[in-house]
Amino acid sequence: MITLRQMSVAFLIHGDKLLMMEKPKNASFFSGMVVPIGGHLEQHEINNPSEACLREVEEETGLTTDDLTGLELRYIILRIKETEIRIQYVYFSNAKHIAVRESEEGALLWVDIGLVDKINVTATTKYIIEHYSRNKNSSDIYVGTMKSVESEPEITWALLEDWEKLKVALTESDS
């Protein structure tokens, strides 16, 4: 039986810095890794991943909606692990300041966005930051599917678009 696991994460940016969390070495999930702020959706958040994202940001950093500007869904990442399909909603936002409250879940770090690939991040984080760096001026949403290419992780990107709306616009322009 296939089950679903949904997560919502935020990449919070202040200038050229990105807020990340280094998980403790004894953590049961991503031990020793540097990850974005976020976590699993609660049952009542299933239809509103931005609510889960904001909850996790406040729980892990102390930052509230008043401390953020421009929270936008930019990526939906899909992968399968054994009998579980994992769906990750990835938001980007600007932080108005760098003052954060320490978290019991890990050490908070402001990392130079251009150096993210030099620290101990997951392949998913590496590929998201690479893609975002090339497309940061866009407000498009991309779907990424994780796969293995010659035993190495890779993401295939697709633009998420309303093809029916596009079809109507093309039909009208032909008239």
Image (spheres, helix red, strand yellow):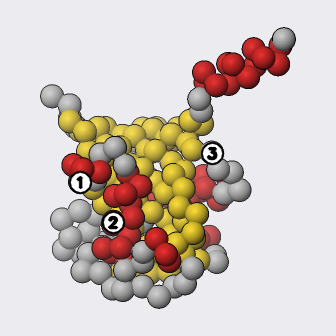
- Residue 123, percent across and down? 44, 55
Q: Are marks 1 and 3 in contact (CB under 8 Å)?
A: no
Between disc 1 and disc 3, whose residue precedes? 1
The disc placed on residue 140 is 3
As helix, strand or loop, the secondary structure at mark 3 comes to loop
The N terminus sits in image quarter: top left
- Residue 58, percent across and down? 36, 73
Residue 40, picture quadrant = bottom left
Residue 70, picture quadrant = bottom right
Between disc 2 and disc 3, whose residue precedes? 2
Tell me the amino acid under the disc marked 1.
Glu
Q: Residue at x 20, y 70 (%)?
A: 27
The C terminus sits in image quarter: top right
The disc placed on residue 55 is 2
Tag count: 3
As helix, strand or loop, the secondary structure at mark 2 comes to helix
Instruction: Decide: is 45 above or below 175.
Output: below
- Residue 4, percent across and down? 25, 39
Tell me the amino acid under the disc marked 3.
Asp
Q: Residue at x 57, y 44 (%)?
A: 141
For label 1, the crowd category at 10 Å Cα-Cα, with few meaning under 14, some 14 to 19 and many 20 or more, is: few
User: How far is disc 2 from disc 1 in space, using C-alphas?
Assistant: 10 Å
For label 3, the crowd category at 10 Å Cα-Cα, with few meaning under 14, some 14 to 19 and many 20 or more, is: some
Q: Are marks 2 and 1 in contact (CB under 8 Å)?
A: yes
Residue 102, picture quadrant = bottom left
> Which residue in the structure is indicated by mark 1?
42
Q: Nearer the viewer, residue 85 or 64?
A: 64
Between disc 2 and disc 1, whose residue precedes? 1
Q: Residue at x 54, y 50 (%)?
A: 74
Q: Is residue 111 left or right of residue 20?
A: right
